[in-house]
Amino acid sequence: MLAADGGVIGPASARGTACSAVRAGLIAAWPLAVLLAAPLIARAATDAERIERVLAQTPLIDGHNDLPWEIRARFGGDLAKIDLAASTAALPAPPDGVPLMTDIPRLRAGRVGAQFWSVWIPVDVKGAQAVQTTLEQIDLVKALCARYPADLAMAYTAADIVRVHKAHRIGALIGVEGGHQINNSLAVLRAYYEGGARYMTLTHSSNTDWADSATDTPAHHGLTPFGREVVREMNRLGMLVDLAHVSADTMRAALTVTEAPVIFSHSSARALVDHPRDVPDDVLQLVAKNDGVVMVNFAPGYVSEARRRWDADRAAEKARDNSPPFGGLYIGQPERIAAAAKAWEQANPKPQATIGDVADHIEHIRKVAGVDHVGIGSDFDGIPEAPVGLEGVDKFPALLEELGRRGWGDAELAKVAGANLLRVLRQAEGVSARLRAARPPSLATLAALDGTAAAPPAAPPAHN
């Protein structure tokens, strides 16, 4: 190799010269790289600062979290056995479970201002046992606040949420997730309200004696006369009517009856994912007229069509391999069943739902119903896994940042974060004040209005 002066440079010297040239080039390029990266770094900081500013003014309100049942199932409801003041992400999970998605440090990191805690119980729990179990779960939510008073405080009204948020604590609200929990009694419904419940989902995964579920064979094609009376009594109490989990016919029937805005505490858009747990466009338009709010669920099968189909295919494959007592290719052979499942999943990788999928549902609801009618209802600790980028309660700001990158203004971000739910709750309180002055508590019964006895219990499903 020739030097600049015409001399010959040996191999070692050539390598040294080349390395020096590379180092010099890298050093020269470094300022340019810094300059190019600076806007990205500044943008990330600006996005985070913007969301921080929005959530300092407006409490972020999540419509649904199933941690109370997980505490009951994993720890026997004993709060001494779990430290929510520390991360729960690494705690051992049950064989069929996943790590917990909720704890106080992550709620703080997620800038959560108020949380609706679900007091769900399985649909096969009926009668007096259903009432007792629900009351125990309500008591558990209150015990959480008593155990962590610096972080959690019970909230019963929109004003409570705002007050607790200004005190830099997290408002704790209670949602009853299934009409089966009232044991067909309006007196029990009233007792739950007095105990702190501020919404009730009319059904869970199975029909009640007075309302159809989205995931059961239609029995009533909406609401029975007693079901309509349940909605009216909820209006009188000031308890939000939650239409998550109910059939489309039940959604429409409830929207015809209610005098107050409704919520969907954890549902997404059916136009994007054809799952019956999601909300059809015609119902979204009715929600806009009702001035209600649809709080978007994070469950992968509800926000990703590819994942919904994969879930269905996997369920079919499981039935093909093992359908006791007499069906299935490998019935009675657990090792072969497990091997077949593993081989199928390797050949058919599971699609991952993402934070972008969730944002798509929020944007679709904004497009159809309007920005005043969309919110957030994660379903954390009630779903088998979470979308990539939304793995736990600490990730809520990332979702708002994603919307911000899509052009959402600060006022719009505040609405989806919590302002819409606050408006709905205030309106429900106003309707309640009017109705309480106009009529006494309802003494209606299922037998008197529907002329039917309670149905036998259904098999329990998962609770998402």
Image (tube, grey):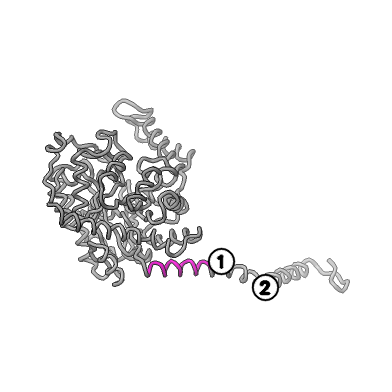
- Distance from the alpha carbon under mark 1 to that under mark 2: 21 Å
Instruction: Inspect the magenta stretch and tell me whether residue 51 lies in it.
Output: yes
Query: Image quarter for residue 40?
Result: bottom right
Name which residue lies at 21% across and 39% down: 210
Label 1 or label 2, whichever comes before in sequence order: 2
Q: Which residue is mark 2?
A: 27
Identify the secondary structure beneath mark 1.
helix
At 25% across and 43% down in the image, what residue appears? 203
Residue 103 appears at what percent x and percent y? 31, 61
Left or right: residue 42 versus residue 328 is right
The crowd level at tag 2 (other Cα within 10 Å; few <14, some 14-19, many 20+) is: few
> Number of numbered discs present?
2
Observer-nearest of 213 and 105: 213
Is 391 contained in the magenta span? no
Residue drawn at the location 35% of the way across and 66% of the way down: 108
Specify the amino acid type for callout 1. Leu
* Numbered tag placed on residue 40 in the rendering: 1
Q: Which residues are magenta?
A: 43-56
Residue furthest right in the image: 6
Name the amino acid type tagged 2.
Answer: Ile
Residue for point 36% across, 50% down:
288
Q: Nearer the viewer, mark 1 or mark 2?
A: 1
Q: Nearer the viewer, residue 455 or 285?
A: 285
| Image height of 67 relative to 327, above or below | below
Q: Secondary structure at mark 2?
A: helix
The reply to whether residue 354 is visible in this rendering is no
User: Viewed as shown, does residue 307 lie left or right of 124?
Assistant: right
Image spot of residue 414 (x, y percent): 39, 63
Crowd band around label 1 with a 10 angstrom C-alpha radius: few (<14), some (14–19), many (20+):
few
- The label on residue 245 is none
